[in-house]
Amino acid sequence: MTYYILIALQLACAYHIYKNKNSFYWYFAILLLPAIGCLVYVIAQIFNKKDVAVVQKEFTAVINPTKKISQLEKKVEFSDTYSNRVELGDALLAIGNFKEAAVQYDAVLHGNHTSDYYANTQLLIALFEQEKYDEVISIGEKMSKFSDFEKSQAQFKYGLALSKAGKDDEAEAILKKIDQRYSNYPERLALSKFYIENEMQSKALEVLHEMQDEYLNLTKPNKKLHKNTFIEVDRLVATTQS
């Protein structure tokens, strides 16, 4: 099987050499040293400088997020546009700077963008993390007219805000929309906690038992990914049933 993959890779490289009129010595490299030759050719000729720059930019953003923030702030200073503000807001939200993220989203919500779905829902999430539940509810009510709001993270935060405000019936109607099999495990765990807090143990156990059954059918990578969530699921089942 490996042999045929290597042959296919050689043919692909040879076609790329021919199409791009690259140096003739590349043919000898991929023929005489198939694996190494193809690897070197891909890195040198296909994975070009532009691609390297993109990867380097993303890598820098992960290991040094403050540098990315600084770069985006300079973009906003140079050109204060909707897209630049929102991009900065997203970067701030990603590192947990919810207060400053909210400032960026709020800054674009005027004129033609007053009812912009994306900026409003991102602002809703940033405000929820600051426990500004009344403002979250206000935005949630406006965004509920958008079809994309249905079963979204923003809608779920809206439901939790309703719960915090003591509007439990409205909250349940929103929160249970995200209870979909084989998905949304952290949100469904939060839903079960909502039921427990409101003394609806039977509904909580129904969600929790359903999740436990699904866990048995998950792949190993997904079990590992959601390990902590399901540890909490098992704990809640034990304490709720006792």
Image (spheres, helix red, strand yellow):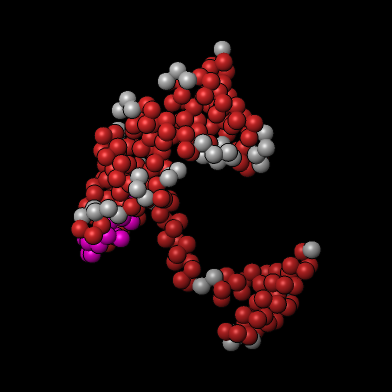
Determine the image quadrant of residue 141.
top left
Query: Of 88 and 155, which appears nearest the observer?
Result: 155
Q: Is residue 101 above or below residue 58?
A: above
At 30% from the left and 49% from the top, the residue drawn is 120
Query: Of 218 and 49, which appears nearest the observer?
Result: 218
> Which quadrant of the rendered structure holds the N terminus?
bottom right
Which x, y percent locates residue 237?
56, 21
- Residue 66 visible to the viewer: no
Span shown in magenta: 76-90
- Residue 217 visible to the viewer: yes
Q: Is residue 38 above or below residue 59?
A: below
Left or right, 20 with reference to 139: right
At 47% from the left and 72% from the top, the residue drawn is 49
At 70% from the left and 69% from the top, the residue drawn is 35
At 45% from the left and 18% from the top, the residue drawn is 199
Query: Of 136 and 48, which appears nearest the observer?
Result: 136
Which x, y percent locates residue 77?
21, 60
Which x, y percent locates residue 61?
40, 54
